[in-house]
Amino acid sequence: MKKLIYFLFVVLLCSHFAFAQTSSYVPTSQNIKAREWFTDSKFGMFIHWGVFSIPGSGEWVMNDRNITVNNYTRLEKFFNPIDFNPHDWVSLAKASGMKYITLITRHHDGFSLWDTKYSDFNIMNTPYKKDIVRMIADECHKQGIKLFLYYSLLDWRRNDYSYWTGRTGKGTGRTERGNWNDYILFMKNQLTELLTNYGKIDGIWFDGYWDQMDEESKDRKDNDVRVDWHMRELYDLIHTLQPQCMVGNNHHMSPLPGEDFQLFEQDVPGENSSGLSFQKISDLPLETCATLNNSWGFNITDSNYKTPAQIVKLLVGSAGNGGNLLLNIGPMPNGEIQSEFIDRLKWMGNWLKTYGQSIYGTKGGYIRPQKWGSLTQTNNKIYVHILQNTGSIHLEKFPYKKIIKAYLLKDNSSIPIVFKNGTVEIPELRVTAEDPDQVIVLEVS
């Protein structure tokens, strides 16, 4: 009996050790360096573009209109973006003050924007016949913009995707149930292509995990998932192929082992006005993804473009929580970026020429964003971003004993603050549509 108990104890111990080995994740030194760069970069461009752009009704059109796989495939013959210019796209991101681009490579409709051997539904079978991912990757490397690749975990097209347990894509006409392990292998093969054929890739941005989970709820956990996603296998594959490559997953939960940054959708970290970001803020680098209008993919009826003031508020709010803003554009199917996007992005680029030092390389303020605005800070400067007209501002429990200087960032004009009993009082400064962020610099010691 004692031998049996001892044997069972050893088995359990070994099983626990094996689990610990597979569930733990220790990032490489290259990955840690990439995280530091990411945390300092603060601003990136998200690009939603593909055959879903053709109907002009957003990237969920296949699901929303219950278009069958057979009918949706016909869009492939219409995709010929003759006005696409990768140099102009990357140059726009750079002129806008953005430090990286996250490009859709395959969305939920299953269309691949690169020359893949593992799907016939790809850019090479369109009239265009050019590898979009390669063109963007080459231009990013040339212009010094880092490249992240968005990759959908779910697929409204394939039979081996577990669509019968998923929440979306029910009306695409699939009746055959394929082998789930075949789908996992398919994803591994495509990710291997993306990480071996296009030079250095700085991040993989996953989406669709939530399709196999219960409806959004604040107490949702990983064990609610209906299938085995093999996520650690996918994460380990990525880190093996490119150790520096950061992994993020838009699952709306706390980070899973193997992830390198945490995502928040349409809200700055810690807020949930859109009903998608239930997760608490983690210790990983943070990123908010948000749209410039109300759509991710091209939507011909959506003219609800954010004002410069709203974009500044998003960027400052993200930075005030220590995170980045990944701001989305949905180019037209011909490859042209709408003038409304271009105008606003260039406005941001000019704004950052003046205020960039209060954004790039900063960390979140010692207090969370407030109704009046946000704080960002470096080792010897606190930047007070006044975004709303609310009268004078009081910064309580100020963490420094001495303020050497207080001035407006835009023109270095002195600000008459009062510092008493650990509270800093800042006089009222008015914001306007043309000047939506009054940034005060407090030099401290």
Image (cartoon, rainbow, N blue to C red):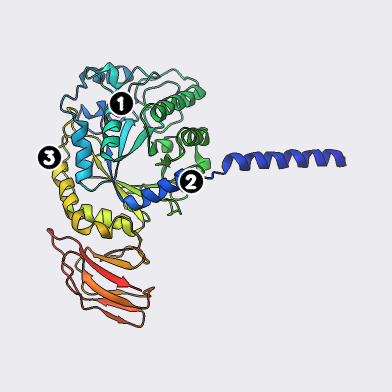
Q: Residue at x 44, y 17 (%)?
A: 176
Q: Can residue 126 be spotted in the picture?
A: yes
Measured Cα–Cα span from mark 1 to mark 2: 31 Å
Under tag 2, what secondary structure?
Answer: helix
* Residue 103 in the image, given as x and y percentages of width and height: 30, 35
Mark 3 — residue? Answer: 339
* Residue 368 in the image, given as x and y percentages of width and height: 35, 63
Looking at marks 3 and 1 on the same chain, the residue that comes earlier in the sequence is marked by 1
Q: Residue at x 34, y 23 (%)?
A: 172
Under tag 1, what secondary structure?
Answer: loop
* Mark identifier at residue 29: 2
Q: Can residue 272 be spotted in the picture?
A: no
Looking at marks 1 and 2 on the same chain, the residue that comes earlier in the sequence is marked by 2
- Quadrant location of the C terminus in the rendered image: bottom left
Q: In the rendered structure, are the residues bearing label 3 and label 1 in contact, judged by CB atoms less than 8 Å apart?
A: no
Q: Quadrant of residue 138?
A: top left
Name the amino acid type tagged 1: Leu
Residue positioned most to the right: 1
Under tag 3, what secondary structure?
Answer: helix
Name the amino acid type tagged 2: Ser
In the depicted structure, whether residue 110 falls above or below residue 433: above
Q: Residue at x 42, y 18 (%)?
A: 175
* Mark identifier at residue 113: 1
Name the amino acid type tagged 3: Ser
